[in-house]
Image: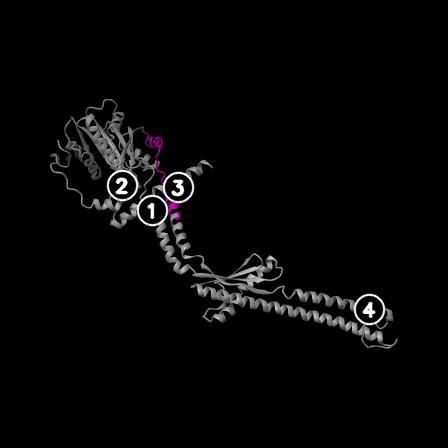
Amino acid sequence: MANDDVVRLSAVGDVARGRWRGLVALAVAGAVIGFGASFVLSPGQAAAAKVLLQGQRSADQLLTETQIATSTSVTDQVAAKLADGRSGQALQSVVHADVLDGNVIQISATAPSADAARTLADDAATAYVDYSTKITADAAQTARDARQQQRDQIQSRITDLDRQIAAPPGTSTGTGSGDQNQTPAQLQAARAAAQAQLDEFDRQAATDSSSGATTGSVSILEKAQDQGAATPSRTQLIGGGAILFALVGLLVMLRNRRRSGRVTDPATVESALRAPVVGTVTVARGAAPAPAGGHRGGAVGALFADRTVDDLAPLPAGRVDDETVRYRRALRRVRGEDVAGTHDLLVVVASDDETAVRAAAGFVTAAHGPIGKVAVVTDSEQVRAALAEASADGLPLAVADDDALFPETDLCRVRIVAVDVEGVRPTVPDQGAVDATLVVTSVATRTVPELSDLAGAVLDAGHTVTGVLLVQPRRAAGDRTASTDAADSADPAPPAEGHTNGHANGVTVGSS
């Protein structure tokens, strides 16, 4: 098998595992639609009768018989017998004939009920036998009439010759047969030849008559028997609908996956951002935001959410990822060994990459120890919420939306910018001079063009990407649905008391 085929099969497996809930939902929807369509498309019950054709028949002759069995000459008789308002032409759509082994023709019929199907099949078989018998009888009678006419001609020839032989020589018989000038010996020879021809004709006629008694006859071999649900049956429509919807959904998902081109290879990320990967951390996915459609929309979104195999499996209960060491190693690779002291760091993250936003918050909280006092500048509510979650253990962290709110000189300022990437050209707001720029992105969430645009936006703002922090998402324990998450987020917890720091537009998360 070619490598491309292996890749394609692997992609199919990835999509099937990542979105199996959506595929199951599509299959159920297809089954429901197939069930509904069965009331319109399913012809009902089927029954079949068998008819035996005597004598040797070629394949073409058998095919002709099946066409005769379903012709209007036969179905008109059935329609007249049933007298249910249907014409012979209408019955042609529910009466079918097929050739079986041993010169057997099966005449099948479909009807809403099994009894009606058996009656229709029996009537169609009987009408076909009657019509075929009539055709055979008419053909046999025509052949007999032709043979009799031929025999009469031979017999008339013999009678004329007998008359000429019995007449005196030189006497005209008035037959006009041209035998008058023949000698008696010639007349006797002609008479013997005619008699031999007549005898041979009679023998051949007797042979044909004995064999023709059975050759060409048609009889009912088996009366109509139930065949069950006619195709397409309700079960077939339900199964076909489920398979069709699931297959179409899988193809669409594969097409979207192929078109998305999400990057999973760190080397490709480095090439697109033109900066080295300084670290890879694991972050559990958070609760999905409540969709605009409410609980119903949340349920649909949960079904079709891409639970991709790029995500790590959930940790056992009671265990969490401690990525502090990896965050601090990434900080050292960005800033060098001289980590402590005052620095201005710029962290760029895509606004729709929630896992990366949480990783950026984790990076800031982990950097608090080796750097010292950290002040975060951001105007993103999403980032503020992630910082609040990351600092839930009581770590003091000053947050504001303007550098002017942090006039202290002994601070390490970390500017976190959440930019829109998907579908638009990203823009990094103007910032002051920074010592390093870190881009935080999750595995398998961005395409190469999106990463390149992100690097271009950083460069356009007057900075250079110093390093990339890759985030490996981990599925949350229990993998809750979006509708459940929406319900949980409907009543957010009130903020803890004592979490303001005196800055006009900032908050301090944690206690001092």
Nearer-N-terminus badge (4/1): 1
Crowd band around label 3 with a 10 angstrom C-alpha radius: few (<14), some (14–19), many (20+): some
Q: Position of residue 353 (x, y in %)?
A: 27, 38
The reply to whether the C-beta atoms of the residues labelled 3 and 4 are less than 8 Å apart is no
Is label 2 or label 3 in front?
2
User: Is residue 336 placed above or below 198 in the rendered structure?
Assistant: above
Q: Nearer the viewer, residue 52 or 300?
A: 52
The reply to whether the C-beta atoms of the residues labelled 1 and 3 are less than 8 Å apart is no
Q: Secondary structure at mark 4?
A: helix
Nearer-N-terminus badge (2/4): 4
The amino acid type, in three-letter code, at marker 2 is Gly
Nearer-N-terminus badge (2/1): 1
Read off the magenta span: 247-274
Q: Quadrant of residue 192?
A: bottom right
On residue 12, the disc is 3
Residue 429 in view (yes/no): no
Q: Nearer the viewer, residue 463 or 315?
A: 315
Q: Secondary structure at mark 2?
A: loop
Judging by the rendered image, the residue that carries numbered circle 4 is 190
Q: Residue furthest top?
A: 337
Identify the residue at image location x=56%, y=66%.
Answer: 129
Q: CA distance from mark 2 to mark 4?
A: 111 Å
Q: Position of residue 148 (x, y in %)?
A: 70, 71
Judging by the rendered image, the residue that carries numbered circle 2 is 478
Q: CA distance from mark 3 to mark 4?
A: 91 Å
Quarter the C terminus occupies = top left
